[in-house]
């Protein structure tokens, strides 16, 4: 196989990354297993190497105040909380009682429940509340991984909430390659494509789009 023909999302490569690509964590493996019981919805969970990267970033930056939009069963929130300083607080936003019940159980098992405050609400309303409380430029990180149609609103509100030097990390920015298919004008794909264009010319940030998993863009506020 010539090098350029290697499939970057082949099963073989995913298996290899699972073997050698990140440090294993029993609670996170148990959570991935438990989430499978939700059937098709389980694909919403972030990838393991993605989670590890986010954890390392939070540890490197000594992050103490973070927001997550889109908790699901808690995988990414555990990664963020693990990387944050001991007294750190992650405000984890999701309107689903069903999903976040599982997250709460696993936050305890992972020993990070003291670092996470669940906000059982829709992303826009929750961010508006934080903005209304005057929390501008207070946060080190906002991780966006929720309903795609609101991604641009989440990005703009996050830009106000994070400190200069802080990060907005957006999941699914490659959206299974659909951003390249201009015949796909569905709301989710169009919104992600438009957000990618906004970020590309946004002078407020330095940014880098990673092709890991379903694509993840890291934006650092200048
Ligand atoms: C892709 S999943 C998040 C995956 C999660 N980050 C993880 O690592 O497992 C998307 C989540 O967004 C939540 N969601 C749906 N609509 C939302 C909204 N309007 N505001 C905030 N979260 C929403 C869903 O309940 C779901 O749990």
Image (cartoon, grey):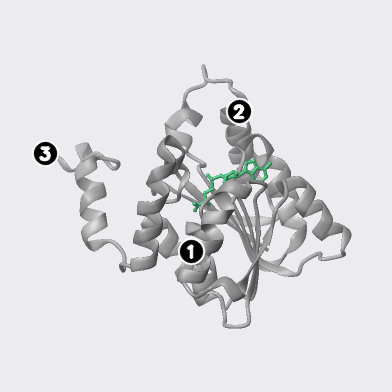
User: In this view of the protein, which residue sits in the foreground, 134 or 5?
Assistant: 134
Decide if residue 80 is in sight here.
yes
Which numbered disc, 1 or 2, marks the residue that appears first in the sequence? Answer: 1
Residue linked to disc 3: 1
Please, what secondary structure does the residue beneath circle 3 have? loop
Residue linked to disc 2: 190
* Residue 75 against residue 40 in the figure, above or below: below
The CA distance from mark 1 to mark 2 is 34 Å
Q: Select label 1 or label 2 by which is in front.
A: 1
Which numbered disc, 3 or 2, marks the residue that appears first in the sequence? Answer: 3
Residue linked to disc 1: 106
Q: Residue 54: x, y in percent?
A: 48, 63
- Residue pictured at 73% horizontal, 49% vertical: 121
Please, what secondary structure does the residue beneath circle 2 have? helix
Q: Select label 3 or label 1 by which is in front.
A: 1
- The number of numbered discs placed on residues in the rendered structure image is 3
């Amino acid at each position: 196989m010539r090098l350029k023909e290697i499939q970057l999302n082949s099963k073989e490569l995913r298996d290899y990354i699972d073997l050698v690509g990140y440090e294993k964590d029993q609670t996170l493996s148990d959570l991935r297993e438990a989430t499978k019981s939700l059937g098709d919805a389980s694909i919403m969970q972030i990838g393991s190497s993605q989670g590890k990267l986010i954890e390392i970033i939070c540890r490197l930056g000594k992050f103490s105040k973070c927001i997550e939009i889109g908790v699901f069963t808690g995988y990414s929130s555990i990664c963020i909380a693990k990387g944050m300083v001991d007294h750190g607080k992650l405000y984890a936003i999701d309107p689903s009682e069903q999903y976040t019940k599982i997250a709460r159980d696993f936050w305890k098992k992972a020993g990070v429940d003291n670092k996470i405050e669940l906000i059982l609400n829709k992303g826009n309303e929750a961010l508006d509340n934080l903005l209304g409380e005057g929390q501008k430029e207070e946060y080190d990180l906002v991780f966006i991984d929720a309903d795609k149609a609101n991604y641009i609103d989440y990005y703009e509100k996050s830009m106000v909430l994070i400190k200069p030097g802080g990060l907005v990390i957006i999941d699914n920015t490659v959206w299974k390659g659909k951003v390249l298919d201009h015949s796909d004008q569905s709301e989710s794909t169009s919104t992600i494509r438009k957000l990618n264009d906004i970020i590309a010319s946004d002078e407020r940030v330095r940014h880098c789009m990673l092709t890991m998993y379903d694509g993840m863009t890291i934006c650092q506020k200048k």
